[in-house]
Image (spheres, rainbow, N blue to C red):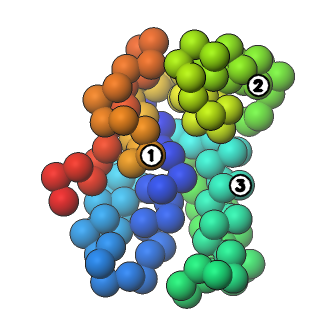
Amino acid sequence: MRFVDTNILLYRVSPAPAEKDKAEVASSILRDRDPCLSVQVLQEFYVQATRESRESPLSHPEATGLIETWKRFSVQPMTLELMDNALSAKLRWQLSFWDAAIIEAARLQACSTLLSEDLTHDQNYGGIQVINPFIDL
């Protein structure tokens, strides 16, 4: 099982010519059956994809339609357990709370891989290996 960070979802919808290769990689990842997400990832996607300052922002119906399709994946809810785990991980690895929550959501989903461009490629957080799927682009 692989956990997908928000940037994968955002590249999936990017119309920017400079991000064409990343959009193709993101689309390929989201065609697989095993991606896992969290409510936090879906929320971050919505906020960033619909932000008015974004080039070609998505409309509310477009963004929520995509979120509906991504609910077919395993989605980790925000729980007290996740919050407590993230608070501990934040201190252990000196991360932002939000990055720690992503890592701990991956752990609760029993994922061993976290696909993200935002964290250090090949870093291991107690059994969660960060892989940047765009590193060779």
Is residue 18 positioned above or below 114 on the image? below
Q: Mark 2 points at which residue?
A: 83
Q: In which quarter of the image is the N terminus?
A: top left
Q: Residues within 10 Å of mark 3 (few under 14, many from 20)?
A: few
Q: Residue 8 carries which label?
A: none
Residue 31 in the figure: left or right of residue 109? left
Residue 101 can be seen, yes or no: yes
The residue at which mark 3 appears reads as: 43
- Residue 62 location in percent, x, y? 65, 79
Looking at the rendered structure, the kind of residue marked 3 is Gln
Q: Hey, what amino acid is under mark 1? A: Asp
Q: In this view, does 129 lie to the left or right of 80?
A: left
Residue 127 against residue 48 in the figure, above or below = above
SS class, disc 3 = helix
Q: Which residue lies at the image location 41% right of the left edge and 14% below the top edge?
A: 127
Residue assigned mark 1 = 118
| Sooner in the amino-acid sequence: mark 2 or mark 3 | 3
